[in-house]
Image (cartoon, rainbow, N blue to C red):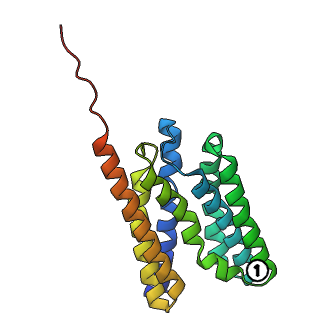
Amino acid sequence: MTLSATTALGLLASCVFLVRLLPQPIRLVRTGVASGVSPLAALNSMLTMVAWVSYGLIAGLPLVWVVSLIALVPGIWTVVLLRREVSRRDLAWAGAWLALQVTAALLGLLVAVLAVGVLVTQGPQVLRAAREQDLTGLAATTWWLSIVDAVTWGAYGVAVGDAALVAYGVVLSSSAMIVLSRIHLTRRALPEPAAVVAG
């Protein structure tokens, strides 16, 4: 059985999506530095993945719920690593997002809410990156992979005529470019380590 080009693109996009979730928790484990990383973005992302698992099961879409279930592993891992950074405000906003998802599911509007999920999951990180000067905790690789993720899902959206996926690609790529620009600018502005004087 041969895969169509569109199906292959969808599988590639799914793989890229999963891979891009790994660099951030790996960096947190390796460095122990969380500066500039948004706990709210991590919480919202985890909750959104749970919602996608639910939607995939309800709608009978194995690719959706399987990919989302796998994505929950690095999502939960990231939240656990950031647990000491989570504020009451973060919990309140994440709780509001969860309540909106549950309400939408009860009203049969979960898909409409999930369509704007990329704004809720990426927005807090973009805002934090724009406001803070110390972004040493952020994994730049995550955001380079986000551009690839956005391009592949956006292309898949064009191929299948899905405006929501195209919008996902636009929002994610824009978010990634903003965060990468801020990482570049803030790391250039870091003071050079003091020279060691021999003698």
Identity, as a three-letter code, of the amino acid under mark 1: Ile
User: How far across and down, in percent of the image, does residue 108 sit?
Assistant: 77, 84
User: How far across and down, in percent of the image, does residue 27 sit?
Assistant: 47, 44
Question: In the image, is residue 89 above or below residue 29?
Answer: below
**Left/right of residue 183 with respect to residue 85 in the rendered view:** left
**Callout 1: SS:** helix
Q: Name the residue located 60 percent from the left edge and 72 percent from the top edge.
A: 117
Q: Name the residue located 58 percent from the left edge and 58 percent from the top edge.
A: 41
Residue at the farthest bottom position:
161
Q: Nearer the viewer, residue 121 or 155?
A: 121
Q: Nearer the viewer, residue 96 or 173?
A: 96
Question: In the image, is residue 24 above or below residue 16?
Answer: above
Question: In the image, is residue 58 above or below residue 22?
Answer: below
Residue at the farthest left position:
199
Which residue is the site of mark 1? Answer: 58
Q: Mark 1: few, some, or many residues within 10 Å (few <14, many ≥20)?
A: few
Whether residue 181 is visible: yes
**Left/right of residue 5 with respect to residue 194 in the rendered view:** right
Question: Which corner quadrant of the image does residue 105 belong to?
Answer: bottom right
User: How far across and down, in percent of the image, does residue 136 sit?
Assistant: 42, 42
Q: Quadrant of the C terminus?
A: top left
Q: Nearer the viewer, residue 19 or 145?
A: 145
Whether residue 12 is visible: no
Q: Name the residue located 63 percent from the left edge and 68 percent from the top edge.
A: 68
